[in-house]
Image: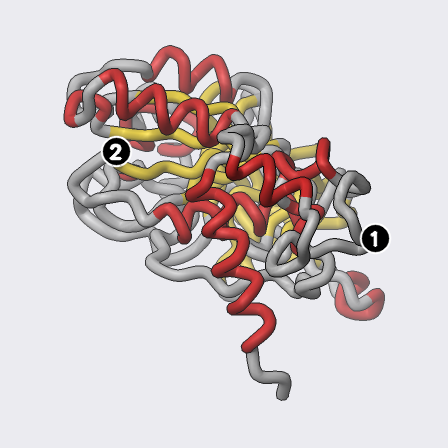
Amino acid sequence: MQGKIVKGIAGFYYVHVVEFGIYECKAKGIFRKKGTKPLVGDNVEIEVIDKDNFKGNVVDILPRKNELIRPASANIDQAMVIFAVKTPEPNFNLLDKFILMMNYQDVPTVVCFNKEELADDEYKNELKKKYEGCGCECIFISAKNNIGIDRVMEVLKGKTTVLAGPSGVGKSTLTNLLIPDMEEQGEVSQTGEVSRIGRGRHTTRHSEIYNVCKQTYICDTPGFTSLNLPDVEKEDLRFYFEEFVPFEGKCRFNGCMHVSEPGCAVKQAVEDGIINYDRYKSYTDIFEEIKNKKKY
């Protein structure tokens, strides 16, 4: 029987098998011998040892499409990062770091701005232009007013998506709209091991995958107020800012890092309004952060 690991706690792995339910499993010792550890998101083969109580063993990990370092997970198709347009004011440097982290791990990012009713069309258009300019899809929703949720579902359909964002932006409200009640999601209530998300009762403390519908999963992650930068060398940082790519090789100097060098095509594109100034400012700030980071 094959399924997907949706949660891992204290040596137990909870495996969702479509149309059957969630099985509480332990991993066979062979994984320790191989130095392999099952991850949330892994597609696995299990043997059922107690059909009535949904108990089993993970006997094989199927080949991974990818493996994310942060958050630790596997077979992720895309990331959806949620920020509020206002209240709280978005921390764009933090958002840009998240996009960088996903680009580094070769995972496409969808930028979802919640509380769209708090911003005018001009501001939303600026945000859309800014983030679509760096290769992200950008959508606006109001989880409170149930606006744009159908579009979110379209973006999620048939994929496994990491859902991330700072605390207080409405991520839990959105997640509760996306996931059916326990009564509707019968396979979850069979064991009671995986509970209904949120309802304002708690904050997510670990990564956990939830089945939204058939082959659609979301990986809910803890809220973040800061992010550790991936292990990118400052010389390579420019390759993870997609809007810089068309200008690569057009600078006066080979290997131009687009910071202080004269004759820089990227800096000229910023002056000409082709590249968003705030995105470029995030780039230089992150560049300096990497440059000044102490090596231990």
Rendered location of residue 238, percent (x, y): 67, 50
**Secondary structure under the numbered disc 2 in the rendered image:** loop
Q: Could you classify mark 2 by the number of other residues whose Cα lies within 10 Å: few (under 14), some (14-19), or many (20 or more)? A: many
271, 218: nearer the viewer: 271
Q: How is the image coloured?
A: secondary structure
Q: How many numbered dots are placed on residues in this image?
A: 2
At label 1, the amino acid type is Asn
- 119 lies left or right of 236: left
2 relative to 144, above or below: below
Q: How many C-alpha atoms fall within 10 Å of the one at disc 1: few (<14), some, or many (≥20)?
A: few
* Helix, strand or loop at mark 1: loop
Is 86 drawn above or below residue 154 in the view shown? below
Q: Which quadrant is the C terminus positioned in?
A: bottom right
Q: Is residue 38 visible?
A: no
- In the image, which disc is placed on residue 172? none
**Residue pictured at 61% horizontal, 33% vertical:** 108
Where is residue 44 shown, x and y percent of the image?
Answer: 71, 41
- Cα separation, mark 1 vs mark 2, equals 39 Å
Residue 270 screen position, x and y as percent? 53, 38
**Amino acid carrying mark 2 in the image:** Val
Which residue is found at the position 53% from the left and 17% from the top? 157
Rendered location of residue 201, percent (x, y): 18, 47
Q: Nearer the viewer, mark 1 or mark 2?
A: 1
Q: Earlier in the sequence, mark 1 or mark 2?
A: 2
Residue at 40% from the left image edge and 13% from the top image edge: 151
Question: Mark 1 — residue?
Answer: 254
Viewer-nearest residue: 137 or 198: 137
Quarter residue 85 falls in: top left
Residue found 44% across the figure and 32% down from its top? 111
Question: Is residue 57 found left or right of 179 in the rendered image?
Answer: right
Tag 2 residue: 85
Is residue 63 or residue 90 the one in the foreground? 90
